[in-house]
Image (tube, rainbow, N blue to C red):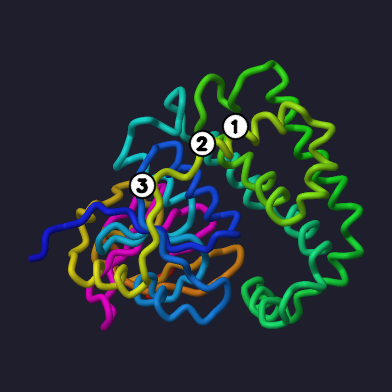
Amino acid sequence: MAPQSHEIILHHYDNSPYAEKARCALGMKRLAWRSVQVPRILPKPKLMPLTGGYRRTPNMQIGADIYCDTAMIIRELERRFPEPTIFPGGRHGMPFALGKWSDGEFFQVTRTLVFGNIADRLPEEFKKDRAALAGVTTFDTDAMKRAEPQMRDQCRTFIGWIEDHLSDGKPWVMGDNPGLADINCYMNVWLLRAAVPDIAAELLAEFPHVSRWADNMKALGHGQRQEIEADEALDKARDAEPETPVTADPHDPNGRKPGDRVTVTPTDYGKDPVAGEIVSLSAQHIAIRRTDERVGQVVVHFPRATFRVDPA
């Protein structure tokens, strides 16, 4: 058996706001990692052997273990590399719950504001891909343009919440040290600054605490990054074996157990099921084993929130 590798490989693209969350976590933990650039739209032929059909970005690979969704990536980084922690104070629940607001309503508002302003520059193939990802017939940029004034209002409201929270002068959302709460609050501010900098400057002019804090988040960086080719990452998965131990959940409400054949599917968008055999599960995660002709046996990890598990 080949020696197991603990090298972190992030499959992402640079202007993905969800990937920015993972990159920020790597920066906070001051980790070295390898970067594989994936296409923004389908097809993604050098990602699918790892994920089994899950197409969303980012994904983290460590040997033959594949972690899907930013929440799962961050949970695993904290488990493997607990210091410095990204949970100052030791509490995990509220920072993850905050991420559901950031990834959900706040992101939908920010996304609409961004696309409403850059709609004329979006390629047709991108629009078709995002319509399919969302499960709708068209990617209606005209509607986004019309909604743009309302989205400015909503963004201002949400950024104002962060401003109010930082107004006591503390450097980070949870106090003296940065953590996941900062990453979740930062994602949409980062997206505005990256995609529509003039609008971001207008909105943030009202919020000096958020502006200062966002500058400090950027200054934390992304750790030590090195680019590699996708084929090298696939070879690393092929030459490794999954490290995930078999772990049961005695309190699973549906009686699922290791060895069961299931599919795991996002419930919000990109609803592509991934099939495999349960290796490990808990209230917060599920890991399934699958085999691919290119990489052999891998274990794919998902969070439980906003994912459904069905018998295969």
- Residue 274: x and y, percent? 41, 72
Q: Nearer the viewer, mark 3 or mark 1?
A: 1
How far separated are the C-alphas under marks 3 and 1? 25 Å
Task: Tell whether position 131 is magenta.
Answer: no
Earlier in the chain: of badge 3 and badge 1, it is 3
- Residue 303: x and y, percent? 44, 54
- Image quadrant containing the N terminus: bottom left
Amino acid under label 2? Leu
Magenta stretch, residue numbers: 280-309
Residue beneath label 1, please? 216
Amino acid under label 1? Asn
Earlier in the chain: of badge 3 and badge 2, it is 3
Residue found 43% across the figure and 61% down from its top: 59
Residue beneath label 2, please? 220
Q: Are marks 1 and 2 in contact (CB under 8 Å)?
A: yes
User: Where 185 falls versus 258 (above or below)?
Assistant: above
Task: Tell whether position 300 is magenta.
Answer: yes
Q: Nearer the viewer, residue 186 or 70?
A: 186
Count the numbered circles shown.
3
- Residue 6: x and y, percent? 24, 52
Residue beneath label 3, please? 76
The image's mark for residue 201 is: none
- Image quadrant containing the C terminus: bottom left
How would you rate the neighbour count of disc 3 (Cα within 10 Å): few for under 14, some for 14-19, many for 20 or more?
A: some
